[in-house]
Amino acid sequence: MYLLYGSNGSGSASVEAALALSGAEYQVVQTPTADGMHLTEDFKAINPRQQVPALRLPDGSVMTEGSAMMLHLADAIPAARLAPAPGTPARAQHDRWLVFMAVNIYEGELRKGYSDRYTDDPAGVEGVRTSADVYVKRHHAILEEAIVGPFILGPERSMADIYLWMLAGWMDQEWLTAHCPKITALAARIAQDPSVAPIHATHFG
Ligand SMILES: N[C@@H](CCC(=O)N[C@@H](CS)C(=O)NCC(=O)O)C(=O)O
């Protein structure tokens, strides 16, 4: 049994969708960041960084970093076929784009959402937010160009697509529809999957 420490609208959405699509046995331990549940001593013992998601594996060990969880689940549950086989060129591209999204787009979203943490100057907060917004959009545009279609790598859905569905959900939908039609369509396909639809409603409804 996997235990996913998560919060609605957070980076736990992609891991929850990955667990559901993998057919894994799992439970979500609600850790709402809006209520400060990630700041408790109990949660600090689970993730010293005091962020969600955190994932407790069936052996009791804990991992953090949502993108690493996606890669781990792909390899731990290969029957779900949510990533190309390890060591193949296709897998290299899969991992490339997943990490691209984690270190650029997710990171940029944090600068948008927690702008005050990125400057000591109160007058600079809005500038951090607006430059992060431009940065996130620029990286969506790069990804848009790279999508083979209908999914990132071609006809097969992968963990990278599930991750992109989450990031797309955080975007201004009007901007995304106008500038990134491939991402918009891909995210809609993931959202409409019967296993993901209730998770989509919980995180983005
Ligand atoms: N690098 C981490 C980032 C996790 C993260 O920033 N989570 C946010 C929610 S999306 C969080 O817990 N924020 C609460 C806080 O930082 O106070 C990952 O990719 O999983």
Image (spheres, rainbow, N blue to C red):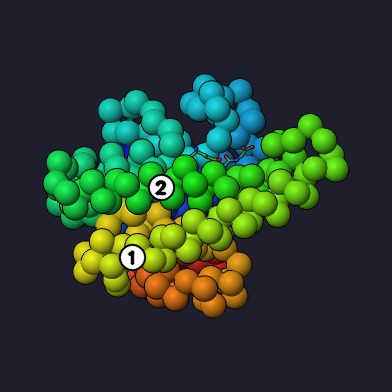
- Density class for disc 1 (Cα within 10 Å; few <14, some 14-19, many ≥20) is some
Residue 17: image quadrant is bottom left
Residue at the image position 14 percent from the left and 51 percent from the top: 79
Alpha-carbon distance for marks 2 and 1?
A: 13 Å
Which kind of residue does numbered mark 2 sit on? Phe
Q: Secondary structure at mark 1?
A: loop
- Density class for disc 2 (Cα within 10 Å; few <14, some 14-19, many ≥20) is some
- Residue 165, above or below 1: below
Residue 122 located left or right of residue 196: right
Which kind of residue does numbered mark 1 sit on? Ile
Residue 130 located left or right of residue 80: right
- Decide which of tag 2 and tag 1 comes sooner along the chain: 2
Quadrant of the rendering where the C terminus is positioned: bottom right
Disc on res. 26: none
Q: Which residue is mark 1?
A: 147
Rendered location of residue 69, percent (x, y): 35, 40
- Residue 63, above or below 128: above
Residue at the image position 32 percent from the left and 47 percent from the top: 96
Residue at the image position 63 percent from the left and 36 percent from the top: 37
- Number of labelled discs? 2
Q: Can the viewer see residue 44?
A: yes
Rendered location of residue 125, percent (x, y): 78, 44
Q: Which residue is mark 2?
A: 100
Q: Can the viewer see residue 16?
A: no
Rendered location of residue 130, percent (x, y): 70, 54
Query: Do residues under tags 2 and 1 come within 8 Å of each other at their CB atoms?
Result: no
